[in-house]
Image: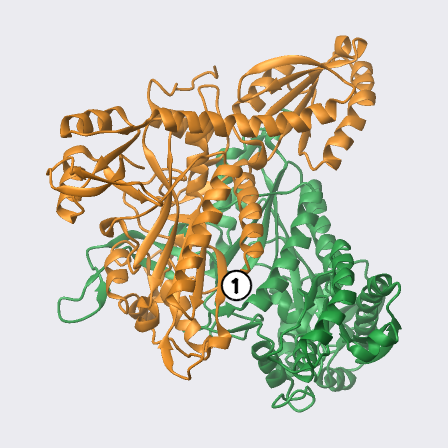
Chain colours: A orange, B green
Amino acid sequence: MAKNFTSREDNYSQWYNELVIKADLAENSAVRGCMVIKPYGYSIWENMQSALDKMFKDTGHTNAYFPLFIPKSFLSREADHVEGFAKECAVVTHYRLKSDPDGKGVIVDPEAKLEEELIVRPTSETIIWDTYKNWIQSYRDLPLLINQWANVVRWEMRTRLFLRTAEFLWQEGHTAHSTEEEAMEEAIRMLNVYSDFAENFMALPVVKGIKTASERFAGAVETFCIEGLMQDGRALQAGTSHFLGQNFAKAFDVKFLNKNNEQEYVWATSWGVSTRLIGALIMTHSDDHGLVLPPKLAPIQVAIIPIFRNEEELEKINEKILPIIAQLKKLNISVKYDDRDTQKPGWKFNEYEFKGVPVRLAIGPRDLDSNSIEVARRDLLTKEIVPLDNITEHIEKLLVDIQNTLYKKALDYRTENTVDVYTWEEFVAQIEKGGFVNAHWDGTDETEEKIKQETKATIRCIPLNNKLENGKCVLTGKPSKQRVLFARAY
Amino acid sequence: MAKNFTSREDNYSQWYNELVIKADLAENSAVRGCMVIKPYGYSIWENMQSALDKMFKDTGHTNAYFPLFIPKSFLSREADHVEGFAKECAVVTHYRLKSDPDGKGVIVDPEAKLEEELIVRPTSETIIWDTYKNWIQSYRDLPLLINQWANVVRWEMRTRLFLRTAEFLWQEGHTAHSTEEEAMEEAIRMLNVYSDFAENFMALPVVKGIKTASERFAGAVETFCIEGLMQDGRALQAGTSHFLGQNFAKAFDVKFLNKNNEQEYVWATSWGVSTRLIGALIMTHSDDHGLVLPPKLAPIQVAIIPIFRNEEELEKINEKILPIIAQLKKLNISVKYDDRDTQKPGWKFNEYEFKGVPVRLAIGPRDLDSNSIEVARRDLLTKEIVPLDNITEHIEKLLVDIQNTLYKKALDYRTENTVDVYTWEEFVAQIEKGGFVNAHWDGTDETEEKIKQETKATIRCIPLNNKLENGKCVLTGKPSKQRVLFARAY
């Protein structure tokens, strides 16, 4: 176990915070609530971006870029939207500083006050629908399938690295359609893209579902989400896809001429995932030895450490290992060959273990003699000696196996920690234990709110394709037609 | 020539503005000075990013992300820096809105005033060097080679799409070194990366040089730049690389323990290019028929237009053309097959011509009979009939030829428009004509400023490896050791 590193059992929250810092993923900046994403953490984000961007393009979307600032009045156009987003936002009121006449430094120039304040975007529906107004005249201009990679700001009071920060990085898709059906299909399509990404790249099993009215995006008709279960039994919303109906089209007067030559309001969706996914990734796989990364998102998939006492020994190792590295790179496997003589092998072992590198190879003079190499896998913390012949194939398969093993482990954990409950006592006890709790709910906001107040559990979602069954609300005993998924959440 | 499209000769500035809009590259947003980069324009930026990012990584750099906001006091730490950047910036003073008690909408909540105002980054030296302070202790932590892709805001009063906008996208490299030599080498290395990119991807010949003191980046010891010459005879600074000396290290107290166990201030560089490059690209190659794009940055390299009167004819064309498209894609050539029946071929020809697609193919029943295809190249506006056998090879070579031809044309233009002058009369006349003017200068700020006042020409740079020759300042007649490059500039 790494030194000075809190175990998950001792204090999960502290374990997380320490891991993010010690694995060089991110740190707090001088600006309250804003993080610095360090190179190693940012590489994970780049890998996520690259996979997602390809999936977006494969489903017909293109990228564009809209302004960072939103005129204050835009936020008020959609009534629910302003309610949800105006509370906590960064407000630009001036456009100039000047030298402080009374001393050193600079002060805000009172003469440079903006006529209308600008809000740093907390999300871009308003500025984008104001733009779409000019882009959409006829059904021939539809659908409009656009995504944006951007930074956004929400002035959170309590922040945690990756999970909740004032500024974060994300992508936001904003699409426009000529029919309700098509917009709804798009919202579901992107939910499926997110769940594919979570399961196949992050090795994070997710439940796809619909949010209740109280958890819905401010301005949406329906919010779909993917929910993951973290190791400490708390749920984490990993992505959302919103069917916005005609709400923003009405707020920004975006109409199109349909095939029957009639003016109609445009139908909309929006969908997003953020750097929060890195928090989800950490809390799904990592352990008391540090980070554990699924191979498909690991910045370094294979670390190779030569064991040598002098230059001559290193040269012999190089002779054998450099062609193998070249082969691995040909297979698009990212390799770090750490032949520094300023650090000892043991230090390097710890380093790559802590940073979650999926496969670690070590090779020294004795291995050369036996034409073999030591292969360690990060997920199981096991080691084996493998013949050097066919080592690249072995590693290629191993990476696939690690990816699958991580997913299976996370799925097993979720299965074990998803429970149906029937009574209020069971409910309370189960929520206290952690995990997903399936329970009947009478469908009212009041009950949902009361359950939250009493147990801190929220309805994470009504799972898609949910089994219908008659039952009684776990709190009120009123009739219910289906169970919904409860949990305490990040 | 495209309809309702101003020619370059009639009004170059209007031609540019119309081109940006009509080619769907960008438009002004509802926020003064902030642009919307439309999907087609953004694809060009993505291609630029992808090429540059690879070049940065190949030279050992990694990406990271630093906060959007900079505490006001940080700007004042470096005296020149605050002078250069504090004047025009977006200032965040509040972090909450609230419902307007007197009516509809929202107002800034006066209770939510920040203790210290935050500046939306105009550039990130200050926040980054405040961070580096904690990352650098010893020479072993150096060099630190980090790049950031980000948005920045400079409150420009007069804006033009891509060329000068309040918000723009860019990359900013920020490196830290243990010696002056190494930092200087890095600044030059990145200048060379920029010039390689400009010449090999943008087909834009550039002059590498050093800025005079008055044109230097605020906070730099030396600013290197690449300067291109636009079609209208004005220069455009396409990228800068700064040797920052120890200025920011001193301002933020960033020291390291050197190999002799002494504390020393860290040496720094920073370097950046922005979406301004898209403006440079347009003004280097485009013509009165619209955009002209070099193949290496074109979102669509080949547009293919089938000529058909009915479904049966289209099917026959498809039979022949779809395998060719597959082959082209295998060669990583981006192809748009426009088989829509909602637009006529002539409309499509105009569309792809205006959008600068390098190669356009047209194929109809008669071409099928003769086993040939019409190939049009955008740069020369020429057409030829080419046999369908080996068509993919032909196109592959053609794309290379177009890239080279564009570069050569731009280089010839620059050569023809770079003139040595000896007298003030010649200087004034030549500056009025446009182009780069090589002239002797006495090396003083006063002369530089006076020349600017009289002619609107600035010293673009002192070219690297400049020929030394004794001469007399074109304005004052005082002795000079070398010519410097003057031009009116964007």
Residue B376 image position (x, y, % from top left): 80, 76
Residue A356 occupies which quadrant of the picture?
top right
Residue B489 occupies which quadrant of the picture?
bottom right
Q: What residue is at 86 percent from the left and 68 percent from the top?
A: B388
Q: Nearer the viewer, residue A80 or B70?
A: A80
Picture quarter with the C terminus of chain B: bottom right
Q: Nearer the viewer, residue A258 or B50?
A: A258
Q: What residue is at 77 percent from the left and 60 percent from the top?
A: B323
Residue B86 image position (x, y, % from top left): 44, 61
Chain to which mark 1 belongs: A
Residue B279 image position (x, y, % from top left): 63, 71
Image vertical order of residue A218 relative to residue B415, above or below:
above
Q: Nearer the viewer, residue B35 or A322?
A: A322
Residue A140 image position (x, y, % from top left): 50, 76
The reply, left or right, for residue A471 in relation to residue B465 is left
Q: Residue B281, can we see it?
A: yes
The reply, left or right, for residue A231 in relation to residue A189 is left
Which element is circle 1 on?
loop
| Total marks placed | 1
Q: Nearer the viewer, residue B81 or B237?
A: B237
Q: For mark 1, what is the residue?
A: A64
The reply, left or right, for residue B416 in relation to residue B442 is right
Image vertical order of residue A217 relative to residue A157, above or below:
below
Residue type, numbered disc 1: Ala
Residue B389 occupies which quadrant of the picture?
bottom right
